[in-house]
Image (spheres, rainbow, N blue to C red):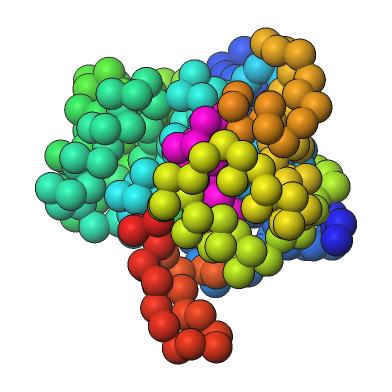
Amino acid sequence: MQSLAYLARQPILDRDGNIFAYELLFRDSPNSVTAIIASDVQATAQVLENVLNSIGLERLVGGKKAFVNCSREMLLDNLFGLLDPNNFVLEILEDVTVDRALIRAIERHKSRGFELALDDFIMSDEFIKRFEPLFKHVSYVKMDLVDNTPEAMEKAAKFFKEKNIKILAEKVEDEETFKHCKDAGYEYFQGFFFAKPELVTGQKIDATSAAILKIIQLLRTRPTLERLCDELDKQPDIAANLMQFVNSDVRDKPAIETVKGAIVWVGMKKIQEWLKLMLYARIGTIFELKLNSTQRYVSIDDA
């Protein structure tokens, strides 16, 4: 069954007014200016599913970078294996708990080539102390003008420049604020003064969480290529999503026309990661999925 996929994009500009990147934002309807997010994990998973399966990165950002919000859970669970590190910046949310597990995860993402950003940073002793272990790993810090005084914005610009971290002013809503941040040394800017988030839609082929989980469980048995093709023949919605995924960006390859060709091109491990991302986009919880009829719980991390 087909429906519409939604997300929004808001440009991030450099000091000369050129588009440097876009932040990709969760939207759940064509009428929503903002979105009610019940789960950061589910929201980001839906954004990435819509990018990969329905809209395509080239259409969204046209070769620019894409900033995406990342909760602690998503960073730990490594759901970014499908993403090209050259195209995506992982935004670490301001409410994450910083501990050794998170630092190891961030080191892993950075080693793959991802740039990382701290989102909604507040220039305070408490934030500096909490996030100091991450400073050597991040490339950008996003400063929210609503939560920081003009004096704090100036102080942050100097503080992070000394650490070779690029600094971005969020929620810039007028020319005076833009000039103040620019004079303070900010390198990037985002806000209504430049552009409101723009809604982007695409065609979405719905697949149920039960069908997705069935394929994940099959992949755990290390099936043959023929066995996986046979199962996908029985799950046409997932097969159709797979074809959209592999053909969403044809810049570096010819169009793939068969499910078998798609599996060979993606690889079994990547298909498992792709299905896991789709499952997160539906269930809104990371660790357990309740199977309705048996009252049995399956750990997604084991998939």
**Would residue 83 be found to the left or right of residue 231 on screen?**
left
Point 27% across, 37% down: residue: 106
Residue 70 in sight in this render:
no
Q: Position of residue 270 (x, y in %)?
A: 49, 36
**Would residue 189 be found to the left or right of residue 113 on screen?**
right
Q: Nearer the viewer, residue 6 or 126?
A: 6
Q: Quadrant of the N terminus?
A: bottom right
Point 55% across, 85% down: residue: 292
Point 78% across, 45% down: residue: 240
Q: How many numbered marks, from 0 up?
A: 0
Quarter of the figure with residue 64: top right
Predominant secondary structure in magenta? helix
281 up-or-down from 288: above or below? above
Point 37% across, 44% down: residue: 78
Q: Position of residue 33 (x, y in %)?
A: 75, 58
Magenta-drawn segment: 266-282
Say if the magenta span includes residue 271. yes
